[in-house]
Image (spheres, grey):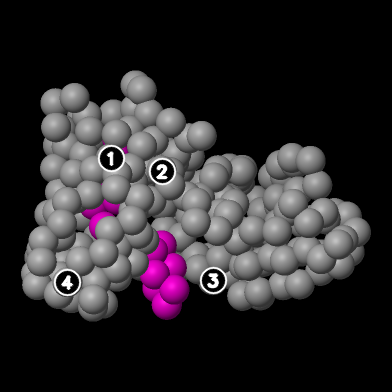
């Protein structure tokens, strides 16, 4: 069974204080790892797809990286508008291709 | 705006009742997914349809059922509701299978009293 564990559960940062969120996964053959952002009362919004170890993707202050066992979402010089819950999901090769989500990291950035 | 429309946004009902949640996918997307999100469980996959046919089933209770219609909209039916069914129900769509890039609606918040 595919498993995704995200840490920490919650993270409070000061504006400008860089940090990283972790996503550890167990999957029988990774097809893709996905990062989503979810604002309160909204549906998750797709951010990145990573397919293979060593791959990196960037978008504004966010950079996602992937190893064979985990992914990191690095947030550089965050702003209050980066406050949200960040979800990680994995998709296995073959089978139903249904993404399995972690429980997320709730990020609050204080001005 | 993801292009996925869910109705109703909020629903309050009593135990034992039945409700129907509706989802219109993005224009052109053939695949619809239903997820349940609660505080203690996170996002849990319920069921997936592709072009009108059921493709995958997750931990969906027997009291729950879904279908996708010829116009590609989907409905999730929840019956004999229990307090523990209170949650956010999300619909997501994707153009094809496989896809990990899902486009989520804003969800339907169900409260069972």
Residue A75 vertical placement versus B67 (above, below): below
The quadrant holding residue B111 is bottom left
Instruction: Assess disc 1: are there few (<14), some (14-19) or many (≥20) residues with their C-alpha within 10 Å of its C-alpha.
Output: many
Q: Is residue A105 visible?
A: yes
- Compare marks 2 and 4 and give the one earlier in the sequence: 4
Q: Residue at x 43, y 47 (%)?
A: B106
Query: Tag 4: Cα neighbours inside 10 Å, few (<14), some, or many (≥20)?
Result: few
Report whether mark 1 lies on the same chain as mark 2. Answer: yes
Asked whether the beta carbons under mark 1 and mark 2 sit within 8 Å of each other, the answer is yes
Residue ID for mark 4: B14
**Is residue B45 within the magenta segment?**
yes
Between disc 4 and disc 3, the foreground one is 4
Mark 2 sits on what residue? Answer: B105
C-alpha separation, residue under disc 3 versus residue under disc 2: 24 Å
Q: Earlier in the sequence, mark 1 or mark 4?
A: 4
Asked if residue B57 lies in the magenta stretch, the reply is no
The magenta stretch is B31-48
Q: Given the image, what chain letter belongs to the residue carrying mark 3?
A: A
């Amino acid at each position: 069974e595919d498993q995704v564990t995200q840490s920490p559960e919650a993270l409070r940062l000061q504006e400008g204080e860089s940090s990283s969120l972790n996503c550890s996964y167990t999957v029988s053959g990774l097809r893709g790892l996905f990062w989503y952002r979810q604002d309160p009362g909204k549906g998750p919004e797709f951010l990145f797809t990573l397919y293979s170890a060593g791959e990196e993707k960037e978008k504004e202050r966010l950079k996602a990286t992937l190893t064979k066992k985990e992914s990191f979402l690095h947030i550089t010089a965050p702003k209050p508008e980066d406050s949200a819950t960040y979800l990680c999901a994995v998709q296995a090769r073959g089978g139903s291709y249904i993404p399995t989500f972690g429980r997320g990291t709730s990020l609050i950035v204080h001005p | 705006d993801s292009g996925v429309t869910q109705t109703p946004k909020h629903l309050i009902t009593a135990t034992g009742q039945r409700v129907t949640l509706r989802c219109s996918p993005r224009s052109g997307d053939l695949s619809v997914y239903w997820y349940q999100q609660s505080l203690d469980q996170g996002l849990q996959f319920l069921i997936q349809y592709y072009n009108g046919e059921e493709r995958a089933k997750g931990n969906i209770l027997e009291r729950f059922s879904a279908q996708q219609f010829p116009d590609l909209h989907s409905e999730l039916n929840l019956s004999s509701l229990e307090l523990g069914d209170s949650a956010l129900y999300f619909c997501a769509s994707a153009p094809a299978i496989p896809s990990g890039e899902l486009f989520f609606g804003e969800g339907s918040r169900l409260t069972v009293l």
